[in-house]
Amino acid sequence: MIPELLFLFDLMAMFAIYLILNLSLCLEFGYGGIPDFGKVLFVAGGAFVVGGFTGRFASWLMGIIGYDYIRSNALVIFMINTRLSSDVWTSLVIFVPSILFAVVAGGLLGYLASFPAIRLREDYLGMTLLSMGEVAKVIAHNYPDLVGGSLGVQVPDPLAWAGEWRFALASVVILAFAGLVWLYVDKVGHSPLGRTLRAIRDNETTAESLGKNVSDYRMRTLVVSSAIAALCGGLYAFYTCGVVATTYSRMWWTFWPWLMVMLGGASSSKGVLVGTLISTSTIKLINVFKDSLQPFIPFDVVWAESMLIGATMILVLIKRPGGIFPEEPQVTSGMLRTNQTNGTGESKGS
Amino acid sequence: MLDPLVRDALLYGNLLSLMSLGLTLTYITSKVPNFAHSSFVTIGAYVSLAIASVLGMNPYVGLPFAFLIGGLASVAVYAFAMKPIAKRGGSLVHLMMATLAAEVVFSGILNAFADYLRESFKVYSRAFTLRDLDFTFLDLPGVFVVSYLLCGVLFVSLFLILTKTRFGVAMRATVENPPLASVLGVNTDLVYTVSWFISGGLAGVSGALLPFWIQTSPNTADVYLLSIFCASVLGGLGSFAGAIAGGLVLGVGEILITSFLVGVFGYWVVPYRPAIPLIVMSLILLLMPEGIVGKLQGQAKRRA
């Protein structure tokens, strides 16, 4: 395949993967007001399920036994992939339960995280979630049976049968998932549930006085959004055909999503879409031109990148705290606007 | 004299006290949990390294510089991020996010500085230690003595500043009610700037002492961010004495519990040490969230 086309498909996959993650952030922070600074935990959760479970499941299914999965990982995965490259149905049988398992695991992690989190004010909430994300990294690093510790594991490739078009097809599949998640989050945004979440976000006490069970809503939001984040992690693991614990850093899976969401507009599904598109294209373009800058600076160009990213985030927060698409008064599906004085936003119910 | 394990635990607890003292200070004044706090710690460590390896001086000479540069970095966070965002009506989450962004910027700068030291001065700028340059005092490593002295001196002077000086009164007034304080002629902006400066300075000093004890890299303090927050939460995030106590209890506890667990389960538990502050923090927040939150509820509305 020509390199330009490959670049486009790679960009598409990255866009779709981050779109899924950012939509989960939109759901919990944009709508629900939960400052999830531990996003990386849930992404890693999904990825680690795929890294730890899929290969074992596939080798059990195919009767490849008698190997240490972690130590002879490359060999086992090679044998699995050889079989998968000619067997579409087995690929599907491996892919579907793995992704389901990843999503369920993400939901469970979200449920666990909600225990200390739901009753707290946003600053404590942020601290707790950030801490959880850090600990996820520690565990993955030091528990080799899960995903091979710092060496990582390979993941069976359920699209091995597509041959040369494997990356293109993978991008399309991930984009399809992203589309579904977008529809869901957009729908929630316009539903009574979305209104309740916004009410809780804007004034917890008022929402509680109207009979809304705040901690229950928060717990459910965390569970659903964590499940979506785990879906993102699982798909990413499948896309890259591998899981290395060090890849799941706070920078890439907590900070970047926050930057994208803040850039586009955290409370609008449209904003998240645009923010993700702008950011992922920029990252990909920077990656192309990065190496040509190296001779001009006395340190690794990666560090210049992180200075730039951090500064961009602060700039966005100062200049456009609401993002490109700030929140507009929402119209719930099937309901007429009653408060005409409040804002000028057009009706955008579905 | 002292058992090395107990000594290590006490030293770590003390460094943690210094770090959470600074964090608590910014939290009390600005009501923002500062996620960039660990960066100031690492900045202090690199000031020590630069003094020792580039200038060839005793790294203890660098302590005032570590205070100064850590403080300036902290003031930069306040002036270029906190203040403009708060002025535009940014929410608490925006402010927290900005401190996370500042942490990313600082990690870039620190790594670049480490690269620069390595390329220009041929210094081991990652995983470095200054242990060989330390002195011993009564069989104790110098860093142990110095850190306890420093912690005492800094705590007492902070206490004196807050209770005995006009500026301290202005500071406490700003903590209680910023609009009212500014109406009465208190320069609240100056108060915030100074408190961020002291906070960063305290972190810088604790960081300057860090390489005397463990190997330090640009991301070393990231691991401690968890412990710093846990220690501060343990101390109630409301008082300096609480921060000191929280730091000591958590630091000593973290090391002693780990060594106890090593005795029971074996050495594989050591890397999981960061889980201890997480569990402790979750337990405190689960079992007595009102105890801590309730105390600050009145102040919750009045953020920087």
Image (cartoon, rainbow, N blue to C red):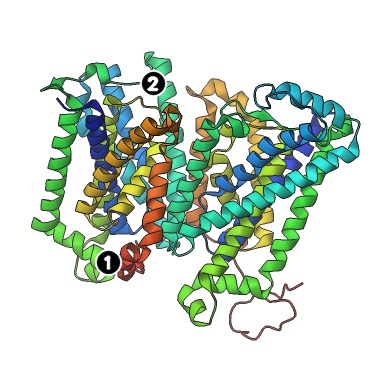
What residue did someone put label 1 on?
B178
The image shows residue A293, relative to residue B243, as above or below, that is above
**Neighbour tally class for label 1: few under 14, some 14-19, many 20 plus, Cα within 10 Å:** many
Q: Nearer the viewer, residue B278 or B207?
A: B278
First in residue order: circle 1 vs circle 2: 2
SS class, disc 2: loop
Q: Amino acid at mark 1?
A: Pro
Point out the residue furthest to the bottom here. A338
The image shows residue B22, relative to residue B145, as above or below, that is below
Q: Residue at x 19, y 70 (%)?
A: B184
- Contact, CB < 8 Å: mark 1 with mark 2? no
- Residue A2: x %, y % from top left: 84, 28
Q: Amino acid at mark 2?
A: Ser
What residue did someone put label 2 on?
B125
**Neighbour tally class for label 2: few under 14, some 14-19, many 20 plus, Cα within 10 Å:** many
Q: Residue at x 26, y 45 (%)?
A: B249
User: If the image is split into quadrants, where does the N terminus of chain A sit?
Assistant: top right
- Residue B99: x %, y % from top left: 42, 49
Number of numbered discs on residues: 2
The image shows residue A80, relative to residue A219, as above or below, that is above
SS class, disc 1: helix
For this view, does A223 lie left or right of residue A160? left
Q: Nearer the viewer, residue A176 or B62?
A: A176
Point out the residue furthest to the left here. B164
Indicate the chain on which mark 1 is placed: B
